[in-house]
Amino acid sequence: MPDTDETLKAEQLIRQVADELKRMKDAANLLDSAQEKVDAVLSSSEKIVQDIEKFSSACGSILTKLSETDLTLHLDELQTKNKEIAAMVSKGGEDMTHAIATLESRIGDTQDKLLTMEKESRIRQFITVGFVVLTFFAASATILLIQPFAFN
């Protein structure tokens, strides 16, 4: 007849093994769930990086166009025209003087508008560069946050 103590010990060992197997199964399920979440984060991060690349490319195009616009040259041209008109005034009469005054006023308004546009353009450039930098840092932070999970 088997010894009762040994039977109890065997049952206890079987329960311990079963408990340990259950914990291992739960841990495996948690790992599977974590892996699914890591995969989702990686996929989202890849999409973010692709979107950032598109955004950066668009910002580069905008910056290129802004840098190609030489507002100072336009101002110089307007000042040259103003001088030419002033020379014509010395030769002309009252009607010419009135027309020149009107043109000078328009040139002054245009110069003010161009200066305002130049200031706004520079502000837009700084804002665009700021967004590019912020976007880069956000992408870097996202990658750094998910990196430990990606290799486990």
Image: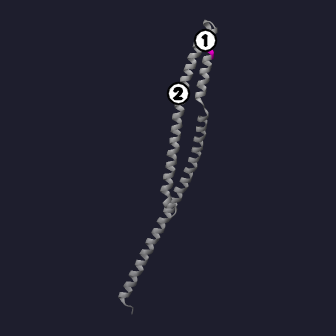
Tell me: 117 left or right of 13.
Answer: right
- Marking on residue 99: 1
What stretch of residues is rendered in magenta? 84-89
The front one of 24 and 80 is 80
The quarter of the image holding the N terminus is: bottom left
| Picture quadrant where residue 70 is located | top right
Please tell me which residue is depicted at 62% across the width and 13% down the height of the picture. 87
**Residue type marked 2:** Thr
Outermost residue to the left: 5
Quick check: 65 above or below 110? below
Of helix, strand and loop, which mostly describes the magenta segment?
helix
Question: Is tag 2's residue or tag 1's residue first in the polypeptide sequence?
Answer: 1
Please tell me which residue is depicted at 59% across the width and 21% down the height of the picture. 79
Tell me: 48 left or right of 7.
Answer: right
Please tell me which residue is depicted at 55% across the width and 20% down the height of the picture. 109
Q: Is 101 contained in the magenta span? A: no
Mark 2 sits on what residue?
A: 116
Q: Residue 48 in the image: x percent, y percent?
A: 55, 50
**Residue type marked 1:** Ala
The front one of 106 and 51 is 106
Quick check: 141 above or below 119? below
